[in-house]
Amino acid sequence: MSNESLANLMTEDRRFPPPAEVADGANVTADAYERAAVDRLGFWAEQARRLDWAAEPEQTLDWSNPPFAKWFADGRLNVAHNCVDRHVEAGHGDRVAIHFEGEPGDTRSITYAELREEVSRAANALVELGVRGGDRVAIYLPMIPEAVVAMLACARIGAPHSVVFGGFSADALATRIEDADARLVITADGGYRRGKPSPLKPAVDEALTRPGTERVRNVLVVRRTGEETAWTEGRDLWWDETVGRQSPEHTPEAFEAEHPLFILYTSGTTGKPKGILHTSGGYLTQTSYTHHAVFDLKPESDVYWCTADIGWVTGHSYIVYGPLANGATQVIYEGTPDTPHRGRWWEIVQKYGVTLLYTAPTAIRACMKWGDDIPAKFDLSSLRILGSVGEPINPEAWIWYREHIGAGRTPIVDTWWQTETGAMMVSPLPGVTSTKPGSAQVPLPGIGATVVDDDANAVPDGHGGYLVLTEPWPSMLRTIWGDDQRYLDTYWSRFRAGSVPGVEKDAPLYFAGDGAKKDTDGDIWLLGRVDDVMLVSGHNISTTEVESALVSHPKVAEAAVVGAADPQTTQAICAFVILRGSAAEDEGLVEELRAHVGKHLGPIAKPKRILPVAELPKTRSGKIMRRLLRDVAENRELGDVTTLTDSSVMQLIQAKLPSGG
Ligand code: WT7
């Protein structure tokens, strides 16, 4: 981030106090911060009582072997029972759980009673297919109700799911199936995307030809588009046939609080994606509490809509587990915001009377670009709280969101968290906090977060550094699947507490990988990733993964990838490639390489720019100096080049640029 934008962030002085209609009767009030500060573990034990336990936990946190945490370890519960059955048992069976809106305009409303039957049928089908507690199930589905049903059916029988985003390629799917050693894949013939059917099953067929995926016994296929689909007899089964004929009754078994609930893969700096492991009791406690606190959910009257895809952690925590644990009524939309027209989202808000909306800055910026007149055509007066997640929201977008979507009236909750944290960590509370455009502001009650310098000392207000989490939290990742050492190295080895108020010296601090700043009020501002993970339209993409994909093309010898600041997508992927011997450097080749990356990693990872160069800038130890390439990609004057093996390399690279650098 440039110094200029940092300066802007520090001078933001607009404040928006909570409106009376949200503050009066808010689910969570200012005293929650005090209670949690006085007795943090007692506070979380109290939140755990939001859930229905088969055996109530006596223990809260076991931190005897840090950073491997156990929360509520002697408690037992069934996550699906908590998300579905108990609401039916409490007399809310007729409440709509899901209003589904398909991209072509087809709709379905599913009550909690119907959801219980569907989840039970699916659980019975999984058992019939030989899936046992502890077996992993890969889910590769579009945004349709069966995605929610499949996840809950897995949770119900204690089989951890690994959801793979439907936009990922066969290669990405195969890697994830192999790493998790999945036994079953749940997919669909396809989904609807930008007005036409888009097939999914072929990617599963291709993934299952890759070595390491042989242990997948069956593929359960939801019929969504009705398009012609290749079939492997004996392996492939239609969902409607296999699930449809099951009994709608299934008695859920209680599992230990630390029973694995799911694995979700996230990009790392070193090639291989990391399988983030989440468990049951602590995860459900914090997703449920934060959804209740930050969205002030009133389950009888609110209509909630989170626009994320189920393939990301936002979909796991704030479409499936948090909202359903709270008995919410929510909208699920299958498609893109501009199909068949750019007012589609606002039409949906109007149609269902959405009161709570949760989306990402990249989507808000796209809507800003399309024009104020589009949302103005719809009645958005039902909205009462607007949320943001995924990347820093720039103050302009924040203000636009509040003015044009929230009628200048709704609180905006900018929620900072990660796949690894499982649930929200830093966010305003809508009935308490005076919000500030661009800042996620304060740690939620019961959460310890601060900003430290290189020596792990808390920075004074008005200074920047790294965001760290100072205390274990219930929904924290438990490890990286199959790789405890990488868990330690990635998150816990960088900082031991120096001088941090309230934290014992040398205590391990969780390194989030984000740069952050505390303003003069002590509010936290997130400044983006400090490592080499790029943030493109809200998705984390590792430079290494894109480089590996480029180098896997026969015409590429070497590649270096950087994220260059981009007003639309936060960062845009910019690749520098060295071509092999005789490869010609032409327009066609650049397109071929972009397509190649798209095939390997999915369209989101396609570089925006690819520049063939003769050499790459490297240090003496052979490390590529991405910092310098970023300077070039962002048309800046070069930083320090003294550690380069050969400083003339940079002149050659700059000479290649259309602008001449
Ligand atoms: C990274 C985590 C959390 C679900 C979606 C992304 C960035 C996330 C914010 C925010 C500034 C944010 C961070 C974080 N991020 N929310 N409100 N303000 N940055 O999950 O893919 O695990 O990415 O997203 O850089 O570390 P993820």
Image (cartoon, helix red, strand yellow):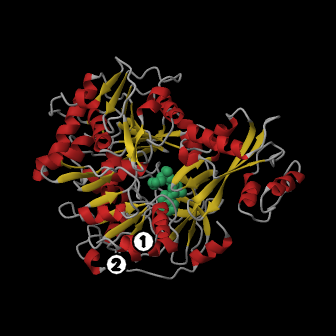
Q: Amino acid at mark 2?
A: Arg
Residue found 89% across the figure and 53% down from its top: 648
Residue marked by disc 1: 401
Q: State which tag comes first along the sequence, 2 or 1.
A: 1
Q: Judging from the image, what secondary structure is the residue with disc 1 in?
A: helix
Q: Position of residue 457 (x, y in %)?
A: 61, 63
Q: Position of residue 270 (x, y in %)?
A: 63, 41
How far, Cα to Cα, is label 2 from label 1? 11 Å
Residue marked by disc 2: 409
Residue found 18% across the figure and 28% down from its top: 246
Q: Is residue 296 visible?
A: no
Residue found 37% across the figure and 59% down from its top: 40
Q: Amino acid at mark 1?
A: Tyr
Q: Judging from the image, what secondary structure is the residue with disc 2 in?
A: loop
In the rendered structure, find residue 489 and report the number of the disc placed on it: none
Q: Residue furthest left?
A: 91
Kindly indicate whether the residue at mark 1 contacts the one at mark 2 (C-beta within 8 angstroms): no
Residue found 86% across the figure and 53% down from its top: 652
Q: Which one is in front, 217 or 268? A: 217
Q: Is residue 62 visible?
A: yes
Up-down relation of residue 562 to residue 552 (above or below): below
User: Which quadrant would the C terminus be assigned to in this image?
Assistant: bottom right
Classify 10 Å Cα crowding around label 2: few (below 14), some (14-19), many (20 and above).
some
Up-down relation of residue 557 to residue 295 (above or below): above
